[in-house]
Image (spheres, rainbow, N blue to C red):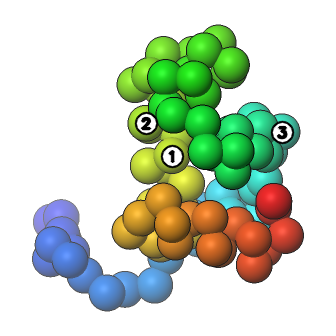
């Protein structure tokens, strides 16, 4: 029997998410945040990183989910609080 969590569950992060946060910031994350900090648009970030625009969006969304934030502004605030930028 499989049990599913209801959508929007407020449960705390699972162990693998906590481990993922502990592994951050990687060099790639630091470079992404550095480019975001300059105010670069996503297309410029993609070009600088040598990745697609979709990859930039995915990486930012992954960081937002990892840190439990809803906006890029919050991502920047939390990254600063953690000393990542």
Under tag 2, what secondary structure? Answer: helix
3D distance between C-alphas at marks 3 and 1:
14 Å
Q: Residue at x 70, y 39 (%)?
A: 35
Percent x, y for residue 33? Answer: 69, 48
Whether residue 72 is visible to the viewer of this picture, yes or no, is yes
Task: Say which residue label 2 marks.
Answer: 57
3D distance between C-alphas at marks 2 and 1:
5 Å
Callout 2: few (<14), some (14-19), or many (20+) C-alpha neighbours within 10 Å?
few
Whether residue 18 is visible to the viewer of this picture, yes or no, is no
Percent x, y for residue 4? Answer: 18, 69
Which disc number belongs to residue 27? 3
Percent x, y for residue 32? Answer: 68, 39
Percent x, y for residue 19? Answer: 69, 64
| Residues at marks 2 and 1 touching, judged by CB atoms closer than 8 Å | yes
Q: Residue at x 68, y 21 (%)?
A: 49
Q: Earlier in the sequence, mark 3 or mark 1?
A: 3
């Amino acid at each position: 029997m499989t049990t599913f969590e209801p959508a929007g569950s407020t449960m705390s992060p699972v162990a693998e998410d906590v481990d993922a946060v502990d592994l951050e910031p990687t060099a790639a994350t630091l470079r992404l945040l550095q480019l975001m900090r300059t105010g670069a648009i996503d297309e410029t970030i993609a070009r600088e990183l040598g990745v697609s625009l979709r990859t930039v969006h995915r990486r930012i969304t992954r960081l937002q989910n990892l840190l439990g934030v809803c906006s890029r502004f919050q991502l920047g605030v939390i990254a600063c609080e953690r000393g990542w930028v």
